[in-house]
Image (tube, rainbow, N blue to C red):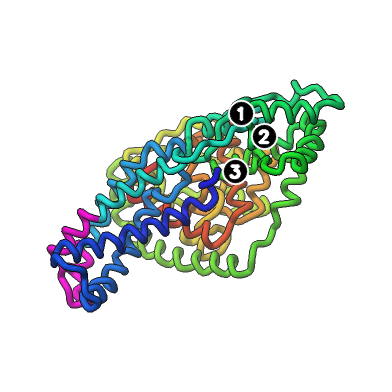
Amino acid sequence: MRFTRHEPILLFLGDLVVLYSALWLTLLIRYAAIPARELWMLHVVPFSFLFAVSLMVYFITGLYDQHTVLVRERIPVLITTGQTVTVFLAAIFFWFVPYFGITPKTNLVIFLLTSSLLMVVWRLLWVRLPGVRKPSNTLVLGQGQELDQLVHEIEQNPRYGLRVVHHAMPAEVVLSKELQTQFLTYLSRHKVSAVIAETRDPHMNKIIQVLYNLLFVRTDLMLVDAMRLYETIFRRIPVSKLEDTWFIEHITRASYLLHRIFKRAADLFVGVVVGVVWLVAIPFVWLAIRLEDGGSLYVEQVRVGQYNQPIRIKKFRTMSGSDSGDTVLQSTLKVTAVGAMLRPTRIDELPQCLNLLRGDLSFIGPRPELPALALLYAAEIPYYRARHLIKPGLTGWAQLYHDAHPHHGADVDETRNKLSYDLYYLKHRSILLDTEIALKTIKKIVTRAGA
């Protein structure tokens, strides 16, 4: 928990130090002397451009993601991927852009070896850094699937500096005049210095006042709202814990003026770029579909847009027909061979550039759903319609982090999980978050992840 909120910033600053240190060591090794100021300035400017690209590559590959258990296990792969791409870009940069007047072949090789070694050492030290400090004994008060997931993450990942000594159900706590004394005795006996409480549990009402009073008795005690910690760690909203007051407190229809201007400008830019690619792709996609089954080139569908208003979108046909109406609830359509190639690369969605230019679809936002599915989910999932408060998008937070979303037909459970990511975006939407989504979408397309 000590590292969760500011971890990406600290990692970014650490990576900068590593890259510039690697450059200094490169010049030291290459010329066997402390680099003179002239030599340093000759290299630091062009290499700074390379560093900017490298940091963007690290971001796209996931090296600045929250170090949850899943990400922590993938760190060696992420470092290898980031450094491999950096090597490729560095070669292109210095061999084909001779603007800076240097072609440091030997220096570049030494730098890549040095920076790779330092980066691996630095990142592995970062992963182990919290283990140097003694973790805080922690009492967890709450119940439910999200609490179990949160406790598991804390227990498996030393980064949060917490050790769960007991996970209690609020319903089991017996209210009495001695409850505060009992709490103090328990906290002292087990040396507990942090309490994670699920404040939305109705059984917590009898305990909240006691916890509040403890703050004046145990000044070293840290109280943490469980669902806020869950949101910070997993970057999603626990849907099962939502109440009407949450939307009043966190959600508004309007976003900041600068963000709205940024989004519209980005939509127009992406719409023009995608439109050019769409025009180039038309004859090739038409020929492929013609050779396979001779069917139609496009499918047109009605989707649910902002404020539940219908919008019409066009896509290259990737299935044996077109899902529409109530048939989508029990779809029997199959992805065609051409569709299997178009869907992972999102080529099938190129015609939606028209929606971007019209303004009924954004580049970033919750994916627009078919009306029949939206009606079903609204009836089964509380607060589902909240995702329609903002404009739907071609890509979004849920598309990046919810891999199990239903492709064909209805799936209430997985859509409920997807909604937790849509609501996170609804709450935190900003220029910075949109930029993060855009960069990671590039990675997903390049790696052909998802369909």
Mark 1 / mark 2, whichever is N-terminal? 1
- Please indicate whether residue 65 sits to the left or right of residue 5 in the image: left
Determine the secondary structure under disc 2: helix
Q: Residue furthest right?
A: 177
Please name the residue shown 16% across and 58% down the image: 109
- Please indicate whether residue 428 sits to the left or right of residue 108 in the image: right
Please name the residue shown 30% across and 47% down the image: 120
Determine the secondary structure under disc 1: helix
Residue toward you, 160 or 58: 160
- Please indicate whether residue 2 sits to the left or right of residue 334 in the image: right
Q: Amino acid at mark 2?
A: Ser
Q: Amino acid at mark 1?
A: Gln
How far is mark 1 from mark 2, CA to CA?
9 Å
Residue to which mark 1 is pinned: 145
Mark 3 / mark 2, whichever is N-terminal? 3
Q: Are marks 1 and 2 in contact (CB under 8 Å)?
A: yes
Residue 83, given in percent of the width and then of the height, sits at: 27, 52
Residue to which mark 3 is pinned: 231
